[in-house]
Image (cartoon, helix red, strand yellow):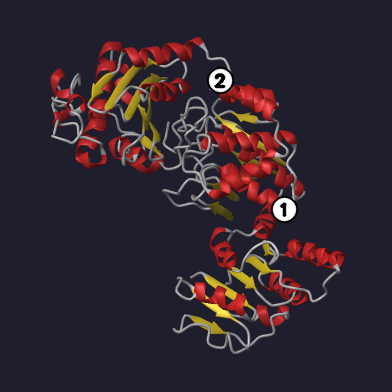
Amino acid sequence: MRTRLVVGTGSIARAVIDSLCDRPGRLLVTGSDEETDQPCETDAAETLSVDPTSQTQLAAVEADVETVVVTAETLAENLLIAHAARRAFPAAFLLVYAGADGREGQTGQREAALADLRSVADRVVDPGAVLGSHLSERIETGGISVHKLRRVIEDIEGTLAVVMHDNPDPDAIASALALVRIAERMGQSATACYYGSINHQQNRAFVNLLELDLRALEPDADLSEFGGFALVDHGRPGINDGLPPETTVDVVIDHHPPRGPISAAFTDLRSGVGATSTLLVDYLRRLDIDPTETLATALLFGIRVDTDEFTREVSVADFEAAAFLLQNADLGVLERIEEPSMSSDTLETIAEAIHSRTRHGPVVVSGVGELRDRDALAQAADRLLAIEDVTTTLVYGLDAGTVYVSARSRGTDLDLGETLRTAFGQIGSAGGHADMAGAQLELGVLEDSSNDDLQHIVGDIVTDRFLDVLEMHPSQLPFDLLGVDTDLPEAATPTASRPETIRASDSGADRSDDPVDRYRVGESDSATERDDEPDRSAVDDEPDRSAVDDNDGT
């Protein structure tokens, strides 16, 4: 059960207590004035008779306190309480209202006291900068303890491996570099590591122009040299990274909502922001670490890519982080990264997707055959979305015994991540965001089929499963695939069921003998932490810069 402790008296303490009374968990309060003697109308709060400046008395509280809010009226008193609370509850998130010091004009003394307070607390709220109402908001949005992160990192014996997801995108790369910087500040050696490759032309330009120090790990790499492991931009070892699934993880920092159990000594899973880079900027600011020009540029690009230039799943925190980074970032390098040359393989894949497309009402599906550049799938899916009246695209291709899928949507209530998980989760791995997602399916015994038969079977499986799921939820589309009357102009409404679709039944295959039964791979939840962008985030297959971070399994 989550336990919060509020220490202090007066109107600020009253406001914080009132905001917490109806929230789940245990609420403990101290104070003896008439405003806080009866903190809640219900029995939600328990009043403690302790001296909050005494570490011994606070430590005697029989509760595993996760959050401490200090709201005494003077800066001097808050400083004493904060030191006692930090020693009594070393792992707790400590939020302190600075208060007044009663010594107007003594600016130097106040600043020294505030600096002392910031060295102890996770977050300090200065009344000269914010209103009291901001206090309760910080309890929920900032409830991650930097001090706990410090203890976990300092306890690691040996080099910390900061592992990105497979084929990392800019957000994962920048986040890893930031955590390496933080670990080094804490006296711990660390290395930014990844499995897979970095092929997307924009990602290659990102790494090369900034001369980023990254270490590529081979699938059979000896990991015994590392004393600990941290995961950024994904949450589970062995899911969208090359680590053994049984790897003990020390730190997980990710902005994707977890779809499976996350186990680590320290976890920060804040899905309310648009990029993991935003979370790392928060740590840099709280630890008073000024990012170098290279790191600031990398983090800013990571945020821009994952939020698609601040248009997708963006939050206030993303804007604040970007504003903080602007003062140190090299905008000239960013311009060069954003306009890299495109390989002939990428152009040919996009051309094949356009040529081979089939239209199913507002949905376009296309198979590009053998892949020479997996990242091109995401770019092809984006290009097809530019077709008039098309709201959803799906592009698939084959590479080394695996079918890779990338999908995009816009202007609908369709959740592509859930759609692909429903369609392909039982035969492979899939997932992602509402508007960007991906999947990957191992061929298995089908790989022995002739090339023409293989292309035909794969096309049937991918297309039929995707369209079947869409037809199960027609209300999610602007108009359904079956030609039902709608309010849309007649020209935009499909008149036949699945035009141009090659169904399994057309090739003599019966649904009861679906090749899918021979196509199964692994557990259906393996998609949780995957991104369908091959090199952006394994699922974040956003072509030009909107790396999708869709955790979907490509």
Q: Can residue 179 be seen in this view?
A: no
- SS at circle 1: loop
Mark 2 or mark 1, which has the lower sequence index?
2
User: Which residue matches tag 1?
Assistant: 287
- SS at circle 2: helix
Number of numbered tags placed on the structure image: 2
Image location (x, y in percent) of residue 399: 41, 19
Q: In this view, does 206 lie above or below 244?
A: above
Left or right: 524 with respect to 42?
left
Q: Which of 56 and 345 is in front in this view?
A: 345
Image location (x, y in percent) of residue 450: 28, 12
In the rendered image, which quarter is residue 368 located in?
Answer: top left
Query: Marks 2 and 1: CB-CB under 8 Å?
Result: no
User: Which residue matches tag 2?
Assistant: 201
Q: Which amino acid does label 1 sit on?
A: Leu
Image location (x, y in percent) of residue 227: 67, 45
Alpha carbon distance from label 2 to label 1: 34 Å
